Amino acid sequence: MGKKKVTNRLFILSAVSYFISAVSIWLIPVSERAAEATGSVSYVPGILFWAGLAAGIIFWAMAFMKCRQTEEYKKIKTPSRAGFISFFTNKAAMAADVLLAVSLVITVLSVFIRMNYILSLGSLFVLLFTFHLHYLLNGRVYKYLKSKRTKNPSDMSEEKKAFW
């Protein structure tokens, strides 16, 4: 399996792990009710949150380690900034950044204004997940995964050179 394919799988596993971490927000009301009956269930959201966060970081670090030695990544690295300080670098990142901003506003408003509990939890879920998507999708690893391999004409046969 090629480096790009392995890096892509690790990147997806990182995003899924961050999603699992964000899903733990939805388990808080369930664990509060269940904590009255048994105390052990109340630990599930915390364990899920931290396990998803740790797995997301580990999978992202593994994806970074796979791609950082390639020439394609080195070309991307020089002109671009780190993902957490970049905004709107591609369509997917634009969607994540807009959702991040909207969910941040709703979450802050829910602190000061009495809102529906489900809406507050939903905005916190979206805020948490899009925060991680922000730096994943604006980052260099994603740019590496989306970069097209440029073929060197000297590596091609004479037939392919004619069409190139």
Image (spheres, rainbow, N blue to C red):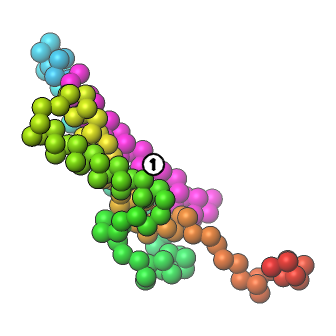
10 Å crowding of disc 1: few (<14), some (14-19), many (20+) = some
Number of marks in the image?
1
Q: State the image coordinates of residue 41 (x, y, percent, origin top left).
A: 20, 23
Q: Nearer the viewer, residue 26 or 4?
A: 26
> Does residue 31 appear left or right of residue 36 in this picture?
right
Q: Is residue 12 magenta?
A: yes
Q: Is residue 154 above or below residue 160?
A: below
Q: Nearer the viewer, residue 55 or 31?
A: 31
Q: Quadrant of residue 16?
A: top left
Q: Which residue is mark 1?
A: 13
In terms of secondary structure, what is the magenta stretch mainly? helix
Of all residues, the one furthest to the right in this rendering is 159
Q: Nearer the viewer, residue 57 or 83?
A: 83
Q: Quadrant of residue 125?
A: top left
> Does residue 160 appear left or right of residue 50 in this picture?
right
Q: Is residue 104 magenta?
A: no
